[in-house]
Amino acid sequence: MERKVIVISGVVGFLGLLSAVTGFAAEATRVKGSQVQFPSPSECVYPRSPALVLGLTAAVSLMAAQIIVNVASGCFCCRKGPHQSGSNWTLALICFVVSWFTFVIAFLLLLTGAALNDQHGEESLYFGNYYCYVVKPGVFAGAAVLSLASVALGIIYYISLTSAKNINDPWHPPAPSQGGIAMGHPQFPSQASQDPVFVHEDTYMRRIST
């Protein structure tokens, strides 16, 4: 495996882990319904929570990982051609689609959860009754799991696409086997005879007269 593939996979994997860890931390520190105070029937007072910063960190890390793996992979549709086939290409296509699907869901959940944890003293009127909105249990945790899945699929997609490109790239023929020794052939044929020697006419006549 090329060094570039290893470096990019490592960076993307680290960002995915960071997104998942901060997502689980946001789940643990989110504002719960029991923590909301009600000074009046129409007023909600939310406590301060680090879930806002943690949720935004998880969302930014996930977006950075998705951008890096897609930029490194290049245009997926532009690589499709008659010479692109095989299991690696099919696997890359499946991982590409599923990775984007899980990324969108996880990113929206993280942003929504972070926004709901930033409410302070707000109220919402619904059919004549006031409600204080809090993030439901499992929103940040679910987003963290989806973040891991999105990043893992992105790495598989990148490696599979790179492998398919190297296999089908006509500019990179396979290296010759080292089992035998290649014998070279001369490019120019050897001369069959030497160049003719020219003898002066006087010398030729003297030889005949003798």
Image: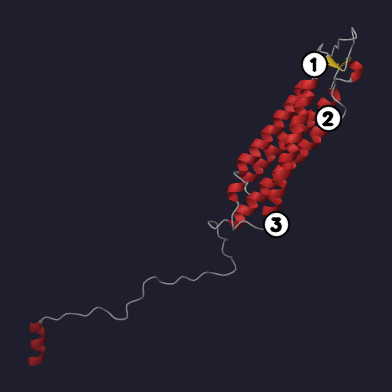
Q: In the image as oriented, which residue stretches furthest toward the right?
A: 34
Q: Position of residue 22 (x, y in %)?
A: 78, 28
Q: Does 143 appear above or below 170?
A: above
- Identify which residue, 57 or 199, lies in the foreground: 57
**Left or right: where does residue 197 sit relative to residue 1?**
left
Front-most of residues 43 and 192: 43
Amino acid bearing label 3: Ser
Left of 110 or right of it: where is 11? left
In percent of the image, x 66 and y 44: which residue is there? 6
Q: Earlier in the sequence, mark 2 or mark 1?
A: 1
Q: Is residue 75 visible?
A: yes
Q: Amino acid at mark 1?
A: Gln
For the residues labelled 2 and 1, the Cα–Cα distance comes to 17 Å
Q: Amino acid at mark 2?
A: Val
Residue 95 in the image: above or below residue 145: below
Please count the marks in the image.
3
Please give the name of the residue rendered at 29% of the width and 81% of the height, measured from the top-left corner.
193
Contact between labelled residues 1 and 2, with CB atoms less than 8 Å apart: no
On screen, 54 above or below 105? Answer: above
Foreground mark, 3 or 1, reads 1
Corner quadrant of residue 42: top right
| Residue designated by label 1 | 119
Residue named by callout 2:
139
Measured from the top left, where is residue 121 in percent x and y?
Answer: 82, 11
Which residue does the image show at 64% across and 40% down from the upper left? 70
Per the image, label 1 sits on a secondary structure element best described as loop
Please tell me which residue lies in front, 75 or 18: 75
Which labelled disc corresponds to residue 87? 3
Residue at image location 71% in from the left, 52% down from the top:
91
**Residue placed farthest to the top in the image?**
39
Residue 172 horizontal/vertical position (percent): 55, 57
